[in-house]
Amino acid sequence: MAAKIISGTQIAKQIREELRAEVAEMKDKQGVIPGLVTILVGENPASISYVTAKQRIARDLAFHSFQDNQPADISEADLLALIEKYNHDPAFHGILIQLPLPKHIDEGKVIYAVNPAKDVDGFHPVNVGKMVVGEPCFLPCTPHGIMEMLIRSEVETSGAEAVIVGRSNIVGKPIANLLLQKREGGNATVTLCHTRTRDMAFHTKRADILIVAAGRPRVITADMVKDGVVVIDVGVNRIGKTPEGKAILCGDVDFDAIKEKASAITPVPGGVGPMTITMLMKNTVQAAKQISGLA
Ligand code: GUN
């Protein structure tokens, strides 16, 4: 059985059309324009391409948007002061600092410095804590996007064995929490695997839903999954370049082999990636509404 392809590109497009209508209504009725500032420190090529894509989509949705490029040697104090400036700037409802940051800057301090009301990345411990206890908050964009993909693709999570590979703060830990919650898209039995897991295949073979954010190309092979599994591949690995110089990407799962066993699977590219950026836009609209007293 060939798997259904869960297209993040298509679902993201649908959500962006919903957002476009919301943004137009906010502007017409209340004169509020969602504002997003993205801060890029240094010139990491992957970070440049992510931030450029975020800005392009923000502009496409008629946000007020600005990319603030800072040199790799900016001091930690100067970066914290810059964040504080945006915390008080009413034109921006969302602040995103692209990670990773240069080694001399403490990422934890940077994440803490963002006003939780403008934390559209959902990384501030205030938002993380609210997420864990199930209160309304900004959800981190990649797990938020995965939840939307599962819900909009009508994947049954209630009672399902959900196995996650990777325990990062950005993906693994939050998606585990969201799948556990007593609400739509939740109620799964969750297993979180990581680099010290003793027998990875033992766990992945039990999965009804397998979410892989391992950060290594094609580590999950067809012999590690059962028939009918739903696979969400969060990996984006650059494994070469085309003759034209374009990056060749692959995920963390062996897509070609697993699509013959799975009931549904996300591709790379065109899966989780477009959803992540779109959920950033959704969070920014939410921030604009809350800060402007519309929600
Ligand atoms: N680097 C990789 N993913 C992300 C993300 O979701 N947000 C930020 N700020 N940086 C990232």
Image: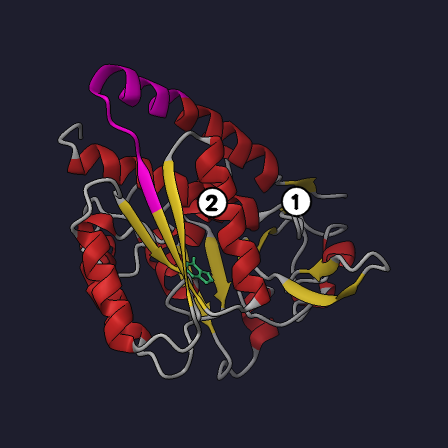
Indicate whether 266 appears above or below 201.
Answer: above
Mark earlier in primary sequence (2, 1): 2
The residue under label 2 is: 55
Q: Is 272 positioned to the left or the right of 93 in the image?
A: right
Q: Secondary structure at mark 2?
A: helix
Q: Nearer the viewer, mark 2 or mark 1?
A: 2
Please name the residue shown 66% across and 71% down the image: 219
Please name the residue shown 30% across and 41% down the image: 183
| Coordinates of residue 140 in the picture (x, y in percent) | 36, 54
| Coordinates of residue 265 in the picture (x, y in percent) | 64, 48
The residue under label 1 is: 263
| Coordinates of residue 272 in the picture (x, y in percent) | 55, 49
Between the C-alphas of marks 2 and 1, the distance is 35 Å
Residue 207 in sight in this render: no
| Coordinates of residue 240 in the picture (x, y in percent) | 77, 67
Q: Quadrant of ligand 1?
A: bottom left
From which residue to which does the magenta span run? 21-36
